[in-house]
Amino acid sequence: MVGRALSAKLRELGHDVVVGSRSAGDDSRPFEEAAAHGELIVNATNGEYALDALAQAGEDNLRGKVLVDVTNPLDFSRGRPPTLSVCNDDSLGERIQRAHPEARVVKTLNTVNANVMVDPSLVGGPHDIFVSGDDAEAKAAAVELLESFGWPREHILDLGDISTARGPEMYLALWLRLFGVAGTPNFNIRLARG
Amino acid sequence: MVGRALSAKLRELGHDVVVGSRSAGDDSRPFEEAAAHGELIVNATNGEYALDALAQAGEDNLRGKVLVDVTNPLDFSRGRPPTLSVCNDDSLGERIQRAHPEARVVKTLNTVNANVMVDPSLVGGPHDIFVSGDDAEAKAAAVELLESFGWPREHILDLGDISTARGPEMYLALWLRLFGVAGTPNFNIRLARG
């Protein structure tokens, strides 16, 4: 769902998109081919399979590229609500960066649902999105992408290096409950300051 | 710091407050005595010692009472930023409720700093606070307390039972990074919805 929303938006913006999937078909290609095609890679796989999918993409096809990671490490194996398969002293964003040290990983967008990712105006009033990553140029490229999706620059908050992805990933536990309060998946949070 | 801020505010509001501490002195009493005194108990201990402190308070002094838990299970043993000593499939709020099944635990206020807890107007614009607990009457009492601190009822969000305390507790990982972005400890988040 996230991959479909993002690829549709990217095409609408004029990008030449190749979607990768495990079961390549009419509208998708093997991960390796998709990754080879992309100048910028968006990882919108199921968090559980993210590392596998990127291993299939192949180091040669990720090297030096901006790798925008929008996944959440959700673990439904113990029922609902899901827990996280990694958290607290590590994050999926960090694991991906460690697995692919030559890719330039930027964690972002994982704190909102697929529709809001590509159309922040679905949520009333100002609200914020986060970026985490070690590479400043890669973060700038991700910020540019977010702006093209409609995120105002002043509401794109740079949390710091890739280890700060723990924050937005662990926020998922609160997101699940705010979903209940909001009564719609089209919600987000805003930083209010003194 | 949290205990001082809360006790000062409670006294300002006319409550008869006894503060408990490990080292009882001029301005505090042993946990057991403080808990025996209170009709409503506020647990503002260091998260690391919360279960010990409440064990010292004693089951007889907690039974049937509203126990407002504002703690965070921060673990500084591996340096900064802190990790959580419990998260993902459990929370400190739940541990306290399990340890004291006859107390009526309400998790709240742990998502803002001590000053904001008792003076939400320190943060500009509307922003939200959360309550989690199994007992509806106890949550209503906590909501009333929050309102007396200045939290507007429409910005007090009931997340559900005590297991939902995982959300606000795990949010701490994001709070630590938003602190860096906000440049002041007087900040909070607001739910923005469609």
Image: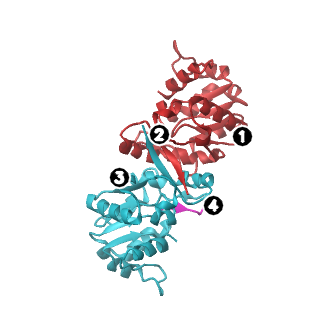
Chain colours: A red, B cyan
- Relative to A66, say whether A174 is above or below: below
- Find residue B167 and report its horizontal and vertical position in percent: 44, 51
Asked if labels 3 and 4 share a chain, the reply is yes
Asked if labels 4 and 1 share a chain, the reply is no
Q: Counting residues from the N terminus, which is met first, the one under dot 1 or under dot 2?
A: 2
Q: Which residue is mark 2?
A: A74
Q: Which residue is mark 3?
A: B158
Whether tag 2 and tag 4 are in contact, CB under 8 A, the answer is no
The answer for which chain carries disc 3 is B
- Select label 3 or label 4 by which is in front: 3
> Seen from this angle, which residue lies furthest top?
A26
> Which secondary structure lies at badge 2?
strand
The answer for which chain carries disc 2 is A
Residue B34, label in figure: none
The answer for which chain carries disc 4 is B
Residue at 56% x, 47% y: name it.
A166
Residue at 47% x, 79% y: name it.
B22
Q: Which residue is mark 4?
A: B79
Q: Which residues are magenta?
A: B71-78
- Relative to A139, say whether A194 is above or below: below
Determine crowd level at label 2: few under 14, some 14-19, many 20+ residues with C-alpha closer than 10 A.
some
